[in-house]
């Protein structure tokens, strides 16, 4: 059978890999000049933004193994995340897993028995409310751990974010090893996207970049042709489409589809500051910067749920964020020089980084809205936060749906 995978983000790459490994002919079409989507390397090799994976992201880690890139994802802080509170300048190392809190030196600030019960209650299935409301009685715990986790995992402010969805994340973090945090040692390009594309090539799949699907020509409940503008691809009865594009594109191509419409931005600031030390990952509280990733090639800062920060100019963001980074670097004795003057910085604003994970019910798109078309994308699994894990799961689920679709009579 022949499969046309549209969109070379992680959902498309994962779906294409499953189909190609099953021995089918696969062509992957990508609108932009390079694959990777919202987890991509920019033309100069910089990541669009820092991406972290947790041990709980089993499908994503398995995908990395399948493309030979698992060892490229390293655990920068195996002994607990260094966290600096810029409000009172206190520093601590915090375990992400409740098991880690058995060691008093790895507890987040504000951890009392009552706060622990409140977090445990959050992890149990129950009525949905905002995370801020669920932790209202424990503001210190909210500020030191639950809010940063909410913003990182759901890319939504705690005052809006769904406690039910965060509960899902918390339940998954409780398993042994689930709270281990991994980052790409060099970057998303060499450590994820390029190995995925190379593996696809080994299985005979073809990647065509710079081709934007403009329209789906339908015949009843089937796709009859893919319209790429200057060229179109006619589909015979043994050809299938895996549509792995963001929600707004899916809604344009399939106007009856209900998709998430509210999105949240992420501001990424990349400092051209080379260091010699090991890769480090630091959390910041009470400032603008939330996470700092220090790699030999540069220092990257993430501001998630960045509704306000994303409006700052590059210069204003640099001037505000560099002193925060520098204080953390000095406090945790990171190797190298950390000058007062900010190094050259580049801002990457992802305005629609993920859907907002609020209390509003998220649309549940059908996996296979047309007989020969299945949908993938991080937004198609509304019970999970929109992350790499959801993207890869959705790509594999869409591929599995197409593989189990009954063969048309002519092709059987
Ligand atoms: C800055 C940032 C930081 C993040 N941090 C994390 C993190 O730490 N951990 C984590 O797990 N997740 C993180 N995420 C989320 C993660 O990147 C996404 O969930 C995931 O990459 C989505 O993959 P996808 O394939 O579903 O969608 P996309 O990556 O959006 O892929 C869709 C692809 O389709 C292409 N396309 C669109 N329209 C067309 C068309 N008409 N024809 C052809 N191609 C088309 C697009 O160009 C794109 O390449 C982050 C996201 C951002 C933006």
Image (cartoon, helix red, strand yellow):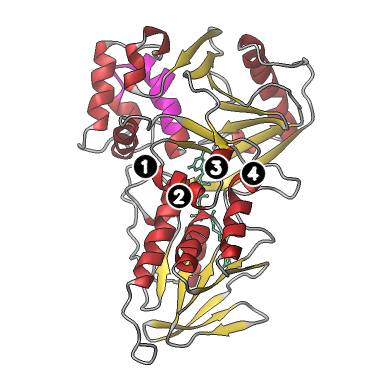
Q: Could you tell me which secondary element the residue under label 4 belongs to?
A: loop
Indicate which disc residue 265 carries.
Answer: 3
Look at the image and give the residue range highlighted in magenta: 135-151
Q: Is mark 3 within 8 Å of ligand 1?
A: no
> Does the Cβ of the disc 4 residue fall within 8 Å of ligand 1?
yes
> Which residue is found at the position 32% from the left and 42% from the top?
359
Residue 358 — which label? 1
Q: Residues within 10 Å of mark 1 (few under 14, many from 20)?
A: many
Q: Are marks 4 and 1 in contact (CB under 8 Å)?
A: no
Label 2: state its secondary structure.
Answer: loop
The percent position of residue 167, horizontal first and vertical second, equals 29, 35
Residue in the picture at 76% in, 31% down: 272
Q: Is residue 253 visible?
A: yes
Q: Main secondary structure of the magenta part?
A: helix
Q: Are marks 4 and 3 in contact (CB under 8 Å)?
A: no
Q: Is residue 408 left or right of residue 332?
A: left
Say which of marks 4 and 3 sits in front. Answer: 4
């Amino acid at each position: 059978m022949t499969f046309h995978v549209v969109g070379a983000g992680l959902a498309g790459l994962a779906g294409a890999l499953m189909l190609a490994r099953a021995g089918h002919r696969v062509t992957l079409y990508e609108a932009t000049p390079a694959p990777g989507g919202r987890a991509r390397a920019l033309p100069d090799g910089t990541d669009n933004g820092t991406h972290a994976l947790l041990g709980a992201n089993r499908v994503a880690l398995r995908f990395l193994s399948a493309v030979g890139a698992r060892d490229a994802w390293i655990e920068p802080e195996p002994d607990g995340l260094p966290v600096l509170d810029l409000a009172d300048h206190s520093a601590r190392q915090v375990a992400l897993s409740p098991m880690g809190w058995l060691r008093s030196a790895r507890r987040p600030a504000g951890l009392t028995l009552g706060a622990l019960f409140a977090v445990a209650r959050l992890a149990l299935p129950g009525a949905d409310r905002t995370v801020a409301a669920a932790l209202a009685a424990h503001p210190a715990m909210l500020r030191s751990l639950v809010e940063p986790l909410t913003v990182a995992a759901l890319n939504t402010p705690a005052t809006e974010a769904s406690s039910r969805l965060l509960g899902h994340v918390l339940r998954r973090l409780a398993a042994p090893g689930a709270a281990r945090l991994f980052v790409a040692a060099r970057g998303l390009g060499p450590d994820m996207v390029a190995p995925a594309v190379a593996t696809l090539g080994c299985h005979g799949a073809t990647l065509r970049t710079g081709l934007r699907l403009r329209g789906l020509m339908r015949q009843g409940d089937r796709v009859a042709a893919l319209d790429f503008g200057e060229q179109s691809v006619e589909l015979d009865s043994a050809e299938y489409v895996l549509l792995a594009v963001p929600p707004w594109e899916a809604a344009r191509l399939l106007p009856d589809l209900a998709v998430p419409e509210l999105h949240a931005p992420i501001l990424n600031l990349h400092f051209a500051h080379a260091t010699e030390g090991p890769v480090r990952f630091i959390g910041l509280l009470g400032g603008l910067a939330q996470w700092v990733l220090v790699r030999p090639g540069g220092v990257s800062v993430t501001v998630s749920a960045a509704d306000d920060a994303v409006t700052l100019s590059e210069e204003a963001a640099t001037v505000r964020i560099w002193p925060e980074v520098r204080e953390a670097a000095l406090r945790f004795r990171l190797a190298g020089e950390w000058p007062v003057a900010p190094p050259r910085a580049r801002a990457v604003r992802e305005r629609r980084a993920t859907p907002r994970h609020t209390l509003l019910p998220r649309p549940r798109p059908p996996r296979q809205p047309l007989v020969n078309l299945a949908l993938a994308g991080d937004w198609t699994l509304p019970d999970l936060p929109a992350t790499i894990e959801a993207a890869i799961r959705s790509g594999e689920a869409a591929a599995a749906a197409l593989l189990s679709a009954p063969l048309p009579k002519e092709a059987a």
